[in-house]
Each structure stands twice: as structure tokens, then as C-alpha cells.
Image (cartoon, helix red, strand yellow):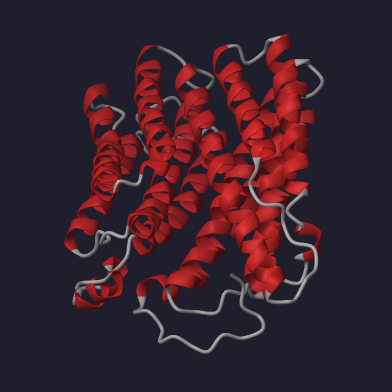
């Protein structure tokens, strides 16, 4: 019987295309760093490329829909075979999916003179393919538990299409497409992060014979997820309303309570674990910040970057660094260099938050951009050999490994 490992081994082409996480995680890191460099030029009033959108629209699209589509693809193409017990996409079909993503990035990057419909069609190609793949796997594998994930991925694709429409007829930076896409991703973090953060923490603590372990998922967690969904719906429909402010602040406090039950304070010795807790805390703090901005207590742009750079940036970097090590057959422990990448991204988040309070201090914007480039450029450099070379032979478990 063919297995996932056997199918990956049978691929004789570049190791980069032997598993979904490899090309998509590598290219997402490279794109995150490159797109921020382009944004620095745009901030300075220069137009180095004929981008398809207005500068601010391009900036938010490059990260919400460009960067995240690659991360989501890498995660799903790696995780879904584990969920369904079916074989992964490897080899030339995988290369084809990567090609769809690259076509989308190219269209948005240099498609300033192209038809808006052509740019949108090329950009949405990967999302459509992923929805078809995930639908097939869930139905064939009868994995109904992950239907909510499929729904959120479909919602993400719809929001990208809506963003293209809004960008073609006006200003999309704060439109329904952006807010809907952001809400879909944040709900994915709340849903999937709520599985992996306590699970990985429990495994790591259990190996160290800890007596206090994360609380298992229960009805209270379901209630927090429900409140999170309602708050995000209000954010999409009425982002600056009083009711939205109250719901977002309540959801933020509820998620802070949720992550506090996962024993993150015990994970200090292992950055690969504590970074997951830090990212989820930024998700919760993002809700509080957005709620406060709806009450005019803090700048809206800085508040949303707690979600954008903090929760989304840090959680995706945490997942990419961890999953790449595990699936490459390496010990699940973060080096000092990787821990420094996490700290750089946290620094980028708070520098961008402060920049919202001091719009005249442009150096804070450049500091945030520089730390972001350091984090994702550093990831691409450090993980290049891990993602482009064949999987290491299994080694005996050590005391430093996590679950």
C-alpha cells in the first residue's frame, strides 16, 4: 500500500516539490520580505513597478491575500493528508499549484495596464484549486470535522474576489473584501490555533513531567469561538460601531482567558512553543485594540496591525518554523537565531502600533518594516537548506524535542 512517506520518496525531482510545505513556506517567506521592500519604496513616493492597485491597496493585498494564500496552501497540502489519511500532492502537480500562486503575484505586481478581470482571474487561480482539492479530500475521506475549514477557505477566496472589485471601482484598503478576508483568517487562527497550541504545549510539558497541563477543549472554548465569530461579523459589517467595539473587546478578553488556560508561562525554555502562545495573545490583544479604535481611543491603523503583523505574522511564522522542522525529520527545537526572528516580528508589531500614535515619526514605520524584513528574510535564509534538501533520517527522540 502506498503511503505518504513512500510517495514523497518516489518523487525523483527537486526535493522542493516533495511535500506541500516546502515550496509554499519558502516562497511565502521570500515574498513577505520582498513585498515589504517594495512597500518602503512606495512609502517614499517611488513607483518601482507598474502595480495593479493603488499603493495602499497593493500593500494590504500583498500580505493578506498574497502572502497568506501561500502559507495557507503550504499548511493545507501538508495537514490534509494527516486529517484524511489520503495521499499528498507532490511532484509536478505541486509545482503547478506553486505556478498558479506565482502567476497571481506577478499579475498584481506588474499588471497595472492589464484588464482588472485578467488580474483577478490569475490571482484567484490558486484559491480555486485549493477549494477543489480540499472539497475532494473531505468528501472522499469523509472528514466532515474539517468542513468549517473549507468554509473559511472559500470565504477567504470570495473576499479576495470582492477586494479586486472594490479596487477596480474605488478604494479597497478599508473595504468589505479586506475586512472579510481578515476576519476569515483570524477565525482560522482561533479555530486551528485552538487545536495546535494546547496540543503542542501538552506534549512538550508531558515530556518534562509537568503536573499542570493545558485545559482540554470544552464548551467554554466553543463559547469563546462563537463570541469570536460574532465579533468578527460585526467588524466586517460595521467596523466602527459601538456594538462592534463592545463585541471586539469582549472577544479579546475571552480569548485572553482562553490562552491563559494553556500553561504558556511554563514554556519559556522552548521558543518553538512559547511563540505559539505569544501569537495567540496578539490575536486577543488585536480584538481589544480594534475595539478601542472603534471608540476613538487609539488609531485604527495601528490597532489593526496588532492583528496583521502580530497575530497573523507571528502565528504563520511559528507554524512554518515548526512544521518545516518536523516534516524535514529534524528535532523540534528552535535555535537562538530562530528565537531572534520571533522577537524581531514582535518588535515590528509594537513599532507599527506606536507609529499609529505618532504619525509624524516616520522612523517608527521604517523600524517596523526593517524588523519585518529581518524576520521573514531571516526565515528564508535559515530554512532554505531545510526546505530544499531531502528529509533527514529519523533520529532518536531527545529531551529537547517537543510534541
Residue 75 visible in the shown view: yes
Picture residue at 75% right of the left edge, 18% below the top:
246
Q: Quadrant of residue 14?
A: bottom left
Residue 361 visible in the shown view: no
The answer to whether residue 303 is left or right of residue 108 is: right
The answer to whether residue 75 is left or right of residue 346 is: left
Image coordinates for residue 7, horizontal then vertical, percent = 23, 71
Q: Quadrant of residue 4?
A: bottom left
Q: Quadrant of residue 339?
A: bottom right
Image coordinates for residue 139, horizontal then vertical, percent = 26, 42
Of residues 223 and 71, which is closer to you in this image?
A: 223
| In the depicted structure, whether residue 163 falls above or below residue 307 | above
In which quadrant will I find the N terminus? bottom left
Image coordinates for residue 108, horizontal then vertical, percent = 34, 35
The answer to whether residue 124 is left or right of residue 69 is: left
Picture residue at 55% right of the left edge, 18% below the top:
236
Picture residue at 35% right of the left edge, 38% below the top:
109
The answer to whether residue 84 is left or right of residue 188 is: left
Most distant residue in the front direction: 219
Picture residue at 61% right of the left edge, 28% below the top:
226
| In the depicted structure, whether residue 292 falls above or below residue 321 | above
In which quadrant will I find the C terminus? bottom right
Of residues 135 and 375, which is closer to you in this image?
A: 135
Q: How many marks?
A: 0
Image coordinates for residue 229, horizontal then vertical, percent = 58, 27
Amino acid at each position: 500500500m502506498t503511503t505518504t512517506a513512500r510517495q514523497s520518496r518516489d518523487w525523483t525531482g527537486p526535493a522542493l516539490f516533495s511535500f506541500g510545505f516546502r515550496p509554499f513556506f519558502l516562497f511565502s517567506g521570500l515574498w513577505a520580505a520582498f513585498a515589504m521592500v517594495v512597500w518602503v519604496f512606495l512609502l517614499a513616493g517611488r513607483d518601482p513597478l507598474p502595480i495593479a492597485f493603488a499603493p495602499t491597496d497593493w500593500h494590504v493585498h500583498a500580505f493578506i491575500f498574497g502572502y497568506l494564500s501561500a502559507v495557507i496552501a503550504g499548511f493545507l497540502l501538508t495537514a490534509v493528508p494527516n486529517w484524511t489519511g489520503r495521499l499528498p500532492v507532490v511532484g509536478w502537480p505541486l509545482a503547478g499549484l506553486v505556478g498558479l500562486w506565482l502567476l497571481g503575484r506577478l499579475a498584481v505586481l506588474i499588471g497595472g495596464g492589464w484588464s482588472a478581470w485578467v488580474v483577478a482571474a490569475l490571482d484567484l487561480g490558486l484559491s480555486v484549486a485549493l477549494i477543489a482539492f480540499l472539497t475532494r479530500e473531505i468528501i472522499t475521506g469523509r472528514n466532515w470535522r474539517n468542513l468549517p475549514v473549507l468554509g473559511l477557505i472559500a470565504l477567504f477566496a470570495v473576499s479576495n474576489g470582492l477586494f479586486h472589485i472594490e479596487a477596480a471601482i474605488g478604494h479597497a484598503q478599508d473595504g468589505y473584501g479586506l475586512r472579510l478576508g481578515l476576519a476569515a483568517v483570524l477565525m482560522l487562527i482561533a479555530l486551528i490555533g485552538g487545536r495546535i497550541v494546547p496540543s503542542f504545549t501538552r506534549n512538550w510539558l508531558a515530556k518534562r513531567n509537568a503536573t499542570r497541563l493545558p485545559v482540554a477543549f470544552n464548551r467554554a472554548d466553543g463559547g469563546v469561538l462563537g463570541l469570536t465569530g460574532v465579533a468578527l461579523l460585526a467588524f466586517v459589517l460595521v467596523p466602527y460601531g459601538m456594538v462592534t467595539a463592545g463585541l471586539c473587546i469582549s472577544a479579546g478578553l475571552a480569548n485572553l482567558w482562553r490562552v491563559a488556560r494553556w500553561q504558556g508561562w511554563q514554556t519559556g525554555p522552548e521558543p518553538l512553543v512559547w511563540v505559539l502562545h505569544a501569537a495567540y495573545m496578539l490575536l486577543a490583544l488585536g480584538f481589544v485594540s480594534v475595539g478601542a479604535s472603534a471608540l476613538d481611543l487609539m488609531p485604527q491603523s495601528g490597532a489593526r496591525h496588532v492583528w496583521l503583523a502580530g497575530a497573523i505574522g507571528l502565528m504563520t511564522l511559528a507554524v512554518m518554523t515548526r512544521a518545516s522542522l518536523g516534516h524535514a525529520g529534524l528535532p523540534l527545537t528552535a535555535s537562538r537565531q530562530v528565537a531572534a526572528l520571533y522577537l524581531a516580528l514582535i518588535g515590528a508589531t509594537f513599532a507599527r502600533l506606536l507609529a499609529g500614535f505618532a504619525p509624524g515619526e516616520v522612523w517608527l514605520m521604517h523600524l517596523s518594516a526593517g524588523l519585518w524584513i529581518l524576520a521573514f528574510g531571516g526565515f528564508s535564509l535559515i530554512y532554505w537548506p531545510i526546505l530544499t534538501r531531502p528529509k533527514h533520517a529519523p533520529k532518536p527522540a531527545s529531551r529537547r524535542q517537543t510534541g
